Amino acid sequence: MGKIPSVVASYLKLPDVACYTDHCLRRSSATLLADAGVDITTIKRHAGWKSTTVAEGYVENSIENKTKIANQVLVGYYH
């Protein structure tokens, strides 16, 4: 399982294929779940993490995530 990301990166002819590890899959899946609005408890269960801090550390600050947060702030500001 750990070599799948580097195989995919090689197939896609991406640079530095050795940099793509199973860690990439964990980070990507946590970020995608967060972007979809999944709560942190579900993300922790998905990856088997007990710590909220660890789970939050795997969630990238994607554009989608930043946009959702900004929209929530604006809605709260204007109400």
Image: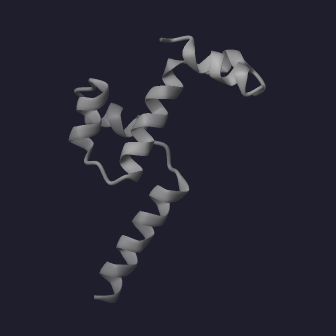
Q: Residue at (51%, 12%) from the top-left corner?
A: 2
Compared with 62, 2 (above or below) is above
Residue lying at the far front of the rendered structure: 11
Residue 76 vs residue 3: left or right? left
Residue 73 vs residue 65: left or right? left
Residue 69 horizontal/vertical position (percent): 40, 64
Residue 47 horizontal/vertical position (percent): 31, 27
Residue 29 horizontal/vertical position (percent): 43, 35
Closer to the camera in the image, 56 or 64: 64
Q: How is the image coloured?
A: one colour
Residue lying at the far bottom of the rendered structure: 78
Compared with 47, 64 (above or below) is below
Compared with 70, 13 (above or below) is above
Compared with 74, 15 (above or below) is above
Q: Residue at (31%, 36%) from the top-left corner?
A: 53
Q: Quadrant of the C terminus?
A: bottom left
Q: Residue at (64%, 22%) from the top-left corner?
A: 8
Residue 33 horizontal/vertical position (percent): 37, 44
Q: Number of callouts in the render?
A: 0
User: Hey, which quadrant is residue 37 in on the image?
Assistant: bottom left
User: Hey, which quadrant is residue 52 in on the image?
Assistant: top left
User: Hey, which quadrant is residue 31 in on the image?
Assistant: top left
